[in-house]
Amino acid sequence: MWFRRSRRRPELYLHIGQPKSGTTSLQDFLAQERSRLQQQGFLYPRLRHVDNDNAQHALSYELREKTVKGLRMTPHDVSRDAGVWEQLTHQVKHTDCRRVILSSEDFYFLDQASRLRRSALAVLADRLRPMFDSITVVAYLRRQDQHVESWCNELIKFGFNQSTRDIASLADTLPACHSDYRALRKSWVRRFGEQAVIFKPFQRDRLKNGSVVDDFCDFIGYQPSERLSGFEDRNPRLTRLGFEIVRHLNRFEHSLDVHQRAVHLIRESAGESRHDPGAGEPYQYFNAPLRELWRSSNQALPMNFEDPLFERQPEQRRDYCLWRSSDLDDAEYAATRARNRDDRCTAAAGALIVAAIDVMRKK
């Protein structure tokens, strides 16, 4: 990690997420723009032998496995012997670019486990400082109720947590980084300094052109190509009705492949319930202690959110999805057809959805 004294080290922009704040869109865009970025003096490193070379997740995976007792991250299997930190050091050492960009929402989860051997953030800072003249940590944060709803949707959708919990109960199990932004910032400031950590609100009316891609490019001073459009909403959520179907099919043991095929079928057939009044203020779906944590965190760390939590608080939690039996008809019809397909995975997914809907109808 040593650099020649005659050579000035580059600056680093470290984008840490948060998850579900347009991170995939931004990473896909930066990867597509690598050549143009380099022409303007930006290095967006490409790591070899990793699961996704559009981002630098493997750097964070390696840190988390190194600092959390017994942790094995399956996405890191392909890159565990790839020497990703050595790759980064080599690219930074030999680049003529004055600025470097690293992006992974997995950095967001550093030091959030309860079985820490040591601080991954401390290791990260120790590894980055010899390479860079300055480090700026950037995160786009959604209002907590919107973020937690979206993250729970992600857990259910991808089968990371094949849980049968309702959304409020699932939210109560999440690490503090999803809710306590004050504590999250404090942990990053401790390692990188007060001025180095920039938290920006992920709200369309606060982002340049309503886009995190546009906003990040403007923040770092990059002039993008005309390909800037079309990089939003690359990871659409399940509807609330779809969420309910998936958590009920989690009652039955099934493989991840079948789970993902089932989610695909549900996404195509389970629209928003016609009788659900909507989710304009999703904080109503969560338990009071969590809402109070959001309120106290936002009072201590003003993010300028449009925050109804400060205005009013419902006396009791609202049901997440108000559906009627007839709302399940389209999903059940699609699942029944899938159940009769010759493809075993599709047939298993269809049968699983039919079983889940049967449970829901009997409730």
Image (cartoon, rainbow, N blue to C red):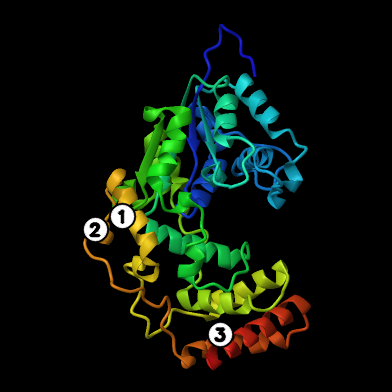
Q: Nearer the viewer, mark 3 or mark 2?
A: 2
Q: Is 128 on the left or on the right of 68, as rendered? A: left
State left or right for residue 271 relative to residue 350. Answer: left
- Dot 3 amino acid type: Ala
**Residue position marked by numbered label 3 in the rendering:** 331
- For the residue pair 133 and 48, the one nearer the viewer reads as 133
Residue 324: percent from the left, percent from the top?
A: 44, 90
Residue 120 x, y percent position in the rendering: 59, 36
Between disc 3 and disc 1, whose residue precedes?
1
Q: Are marks 3 and 2 in contact (CB under 8 Å)?
A: no
Please provide percent x and percent y for residue 226.
44, 45
Report, in whole angstroms, how far the alpha carbon at label 3 lies from the one at label 1. Answer: 38 Å
Residue highlighted by disc 1: 295
Mark 3 vs mark 1, foreground winner is 1
Quarter assignment of residue 337? bottom right
Give above or below for 351 relative to 25: below
Relative to 68, is 168 above or below? below
- Find residue 44 and report its horizontal and vertical position in percent: 56, 34
Label of residue 310 in the image:
2
Distance in Å between CA atoms under marks 3 and 2: 38 Å
Q: Amino acid at mark 2?
A: Phe
